Image (spheres, rainbow, N blue to C red):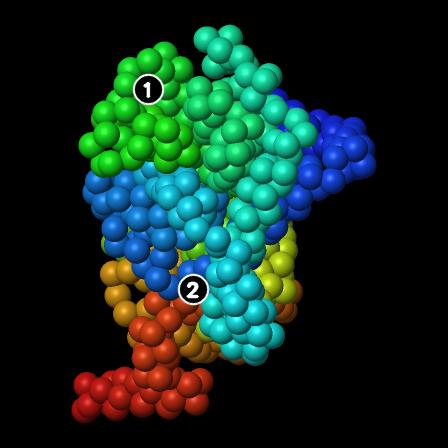
Amino acid sequence: MSQGICYISLANNWVQAVLRNILLPTIFGLLAYSFWISPDFQTVAAGLSLFMFGMLSLEQGFKAFTGGTLELLLRRFTDRQWKSITLGVVSTTIMQSSSLVSLITISFLSAGLIKLAAGIGIIFGANLGTTTGAWLVAGFGLKVKISAYAMPLLTFGVLLIFQNSKKLKGIGHGLAGLGLLFLGIHFMKEGFDAFSQSINLASYAVGGYKGLFLFTAIGAAATVVLQSSHATLVLIITALASGQITYENAMALAIGANVGTTITAMIGSLSANIEGKRLAVAHLIFNLTTGLLAIGLISQLIDSVDLVSDFVGIRSDDYTLKIAVFHTLFNLLGLVVMVPFIKRLAEILEEYVHLPKADVAAPKYISSASMGVPAAATEAIRKELIHLYEHAFRLIAHGLSLHRGVIRSEKDLKEAASATRRVMELDVDLYYERYIKNLHGSIVEFIIKLQSASIGEDDAEQLAQLRQASINILEAVKALKHLHKNLSRQLLTCGPKVRSQYDDMRVEIASVMRELEVVKEGESDIILSLDEASLELKQADNELSASLDDLIRSSAISQTQATSLMNDGNYSRHLAQSLLAMGRGLFGARHKALSDAQQQMSLADSELEDLMKKATLARGNAAEEWKL
């Protein structure tokens, strides 16, 4: 399956090259020739263009309000399968954009905020929710003169777009988008009405299963070219209203539009991470299954459409509304058939759809798919930084010749350090190049791209914190590279006094790492725990310096050994301090409100120094009292 993903990626590059170099110029040429021979076709094409541009503007307007509401819904209402499906239906019905819902779903799935099964439920529900667009066009767009509503919407929308407020701009884009949608539908209808006076495309209708398969393929191809099943459906409905296509062929075109939208989803998922790819495969399976069911049960579906139409009072010759009924029924059929298999489908995709193994650490959470949703992108960065820290944790632990299990356990670190005299085999430089450097570069590059986008002050502040956290991890690893050279040699060759100094350094760093593991799991207050770790680090560092001074004064070690110990003590201190700084930026950014409150209670360096002096004085007084 991973080889298949590689082949898909290569195929995607080939398809993009064909679109850019062959297909796009061909489409331009055909359109120019069509405009020359038929002015009426210009009206249809212009109407379709306005409709598609209106959809883009409407999506942009909704994005201004996705900074909290939809994200909150995705977090809270995906713990049950029926909730995920309902959320997909409702959100797509409101926004009239399954692509925007899919984008946000992939973003949150990639960031690990929702499970794959929940994402599949949302996408399945979105497929049903998008059928409401056909009802709006057939029931409202073609029954009234909607161009009269388009003009004021465009006017007010454009005025609001030029305002400074992000919310007002969002409302403006939404109003302008609706105006363009209405205007596009009006022009398409007018164009097809005028077009029918010169050419009757219905004369090219094909009946039976031959026509069913032919027009299904045409519908799929049109959706791939237009990159929107919604636009294809509007084109189908307006053409049907003008009598340019038959009712049966319109049904086949609607099935094809459903199938075609999965191809665009597959192409778009290639820029997402593995979770986005799995979701795209699930979308493909659902729509292909739905399409095959619709083709196989076409007679039964036609009868069902007639029954439903009679029940709700739709005239027998109102084919535009009957197409809306048909579109809803076969999507509902696919949903009923596929819902019982959502969990099993998720398990199969997680088991078989994998990326090929690479020699270097690749990002697991960040991807361009989440770039348009700041909340999801920020969470993806945080998870990716934890991924980077896990690699750094392994490298630092092995560089200290300590097992990760020992650091994560409650075992006495001093005993573990003194008992370890076997240096773990480790190529620090190679591990750094493969698992740290490249992943750090990917994270920073992603943050820079996100910072260049239009984001709020809170998001910008969190991004700055997370970027610094990544730099802190890199600094810690670089300090280990210097420390490891002497540490590996001294553990084996030097006397007990020098080894004891290096053991204290190892314990000092491992203690910080142990505390960070507790904080990472959310088992303690972030800032207060790190303050305590900072205080303990300063105390241990002072004790280490005092012990080294005693060794130098008593000539217990050579000048060379003293110099090495002082240098490595600096590396050890810098490593531990970098890890603590990383913890503040990474884990403190997890809950900003909590972090801000804790930050106000955190201790400044001067306060830490005062506490440390008081603790030292207290120990001295206790010792004097004991002597007396």
State the residue in front, 591 or 582. 591
- Label 2 near label 1: C-beta < 8 Å? no
* 418 in relation to 195, above or below: below
Q: State which mark lies toward you, 1 or 2.
A: 1
The residue located at (51%, 8%) in the rendering is 210
Which mark sits nearer the N-terminus, 1 or 2? 2
Q: Is residue 529 left or right of residue 579?
A: left
* 321 in relation to 217, above or below: below
The residue located at (32%, 83%) in the rendering is 601
State the residue in front, 435 or 93. 93
- The residue type indicated by label 1 comes to Ile
Q: Is residue 443 left or right of residue 386?
A: right
- Is the C terminus in the top left, top right, bottom left or bottom right quadrant? bottom left
The residue located at (56%, 28%) in the rendering is 244
The residue located at (61%, 31%) in the rendering is 196
* 15 in relation to 48, above or below: above
State which quadrant residue 351 falls in: top left
Q: Is residue 45 visible?
A: no
For disc 2, the marked residue is 65
